[in-house]
Amino acid sequence: MKRIFQLKLSIYNPQPLRLVHLLKASALSCFFLAGCSSSSHLESNQPQKQVSIKRDNYGTPHIYADDTYGLFYGYGYAVATDRLFQMEMSKRTGLGTVAEVLGSEYLQYDIATHSRFNPDEIKRQIAQLSPEDRAIFDGYAAGFNKRIKEVLANPELMPKEFIDYDFQPSLWASEDIAMVWVGLILNRFFSASSEVSNLDLLTQLQKEKGQATGLKLYQQLRWLDDPSAPTIIESDQKAQISVHQKSQVKNISPISDQAAKQYLAQARVAMGKSVVDGVPTASNAWVVKADKTVEGQTVLYNGPQQGWYTPAITYSIGLHGAGYNLTGITPVGLPAILFGTNGKIAWGSTVGSLDTNDIYQLKLNPNNSKQYLYQGQYIPLEHRQISIKVRNQADHVLDVYKSKQGFVSTWDEKNHTAYAQKRSWEGLEIETLLGWANAAKANNWNEFLDQAKRVAASITWFYADTQNNIGVAALGRLPIRPENQHIQLPAQGDGSMEWQGFYDFSHNPKAYNPEKGYISSWNNKAYAGLRSDSSNFSYVDRVNELIEPLTS
């Protein structure tokens, strides 16, 4: 049986290492500042700024600095000290430069990265940041580079992986930290869509059973809503964002077997087999009020099931100063600490189920496959050519095409169509990261939501505080879709199904101090009436394993 990693965040301040137990559930791993076993001081390259790094008895680095630049300078230095090779490969994954050092075997991953976003857009967002926000990225890169220079100057410090693969760590620019977030995290974990898979299923069923019977069978296999499915949030706000779009399927072209296989193969490379194939490995969380714990304290439990890696994909850190006072963990040393506590609140998350991505089916010009029908005329796709370096081989030249809706991933020559993806968080990648980072400074629920509204990607946030309050919010920038768009299938890319704006954050479902005294999630249905391309939720759900002990 696969062992599940769990994170427990206690948001009060008991005696060191005293564990909290949830009724009918065992206590799991904890984070506390438990005394320092070692410490060091760094001089940042800003005048008269000192950064201290103290490691507790578990080896977790705690960074102390008075300003944001110094705090993240120490953070970058600590991550580079502990995870230099992992971070080098995380950066290369985000940038699409893995094949440059590991060879042609990894070229497909670089192609997937370059085919899904434009690094120039991310650099533009970084350039527009305020000095305070920019200091996060500048400080992190400078601290990271300090450690790299130490390693390059002393061969004995070089991690073995660099020796084995025969290349050296590369210096970091400020935007490289953002590229890890965008290219590795957003691009891979927040771009999922089942619309092409659904279309492939519908196509196969109608081919075998006829149009009418095939559609009926499809609707039985891909139901829109099971009202008996357990939900994370009990909310009255659902009606405004879950209007059932009319089931318009007659104008959608079928997809060929070859195009469906191509799309799914590329998606598995870009996002991972488990994400595309629906293997249930994602995260769980539960938050309980004081009367459900032995010690009488509010507790947030979170199990970020992000897979098994050596070293772990998560990194433990403490940040103290410049408005931060947290201990927590985060994937691949991100500037935003995704799971943590600051002594006043605790926060965590599980993957969201709000539909923030759409696939568009483009009708191509039969005489020119690089043109598509839009508002009554064929217009050219945007074209960009990228040269990808491959170790010991000539560069690979990649042609990237983009429609008004987004990057083109798949071509269906048989049906003169192509498929492009639109994501509501595009253009807000850095804003989303900063919202997540600044949530760590919140002292109460309202301050927490002020940062939550900045997050454009679909994610479910959990909250607890020392005043016996608990909360949950389903985050994500929600598109206002036209009534003629079928929520489960690709939209038409001819201009007739364009988004009509976005709902205000006030429409996102939330719950604060629910009467039942707890909140539970195992990536189940976010709220009643949820509509999305992959909302096959039912009363049969693994979250029941959490609900049973919580209700008893």
Image: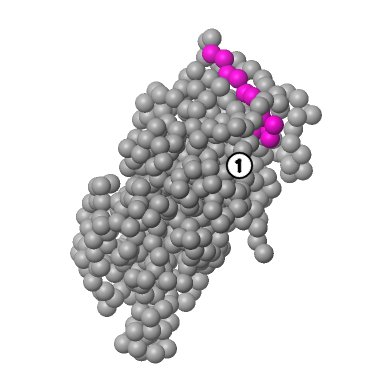
When the figure is inspected, residue 51 is found, relative to residue 262, above or below; the finding is above
Q: How many marks?
A: 1
Q: Position of residue 509 (x, y in %)?
A: 31, 53
Which residues are the magenta region? 49-60
- Does the magenta portion include 249? no
Q: Image point 36% across, 26% down: which residue?
A: 130
Residue 233 lies in what quarter of the image? Answer: bottom left
Q: Quadrant of residue 15?
A: top right
* Residue positioned 35% across, 53% down in the render: 515
**Residue 50 sits inside the magenta stretch:** yes
Quadrant occupied by the N terminus: bottom right
Residue 428: percent from left, percent from top:
36, 42
Crowding around mark 1 (Cα neighbors within 10 Å: few <14, some 14 to 19, many 20+) is: some
Front-most of residues 509 and 88? 509
Q: Is residue 257 left or right of residue 272?
A: left
| Residue type, numbered disc 1 | Leu
Q: Residue at image x 49%, y 43%?
A: 296
Q: Nearer the viewer, residue 99 or 93?
A: 93
Residue at (23%, 61%) from the top-left corner? 239
Q: Is residue 148 visible?
A: no
Quarter of the image where one finds residue 200: bottom left
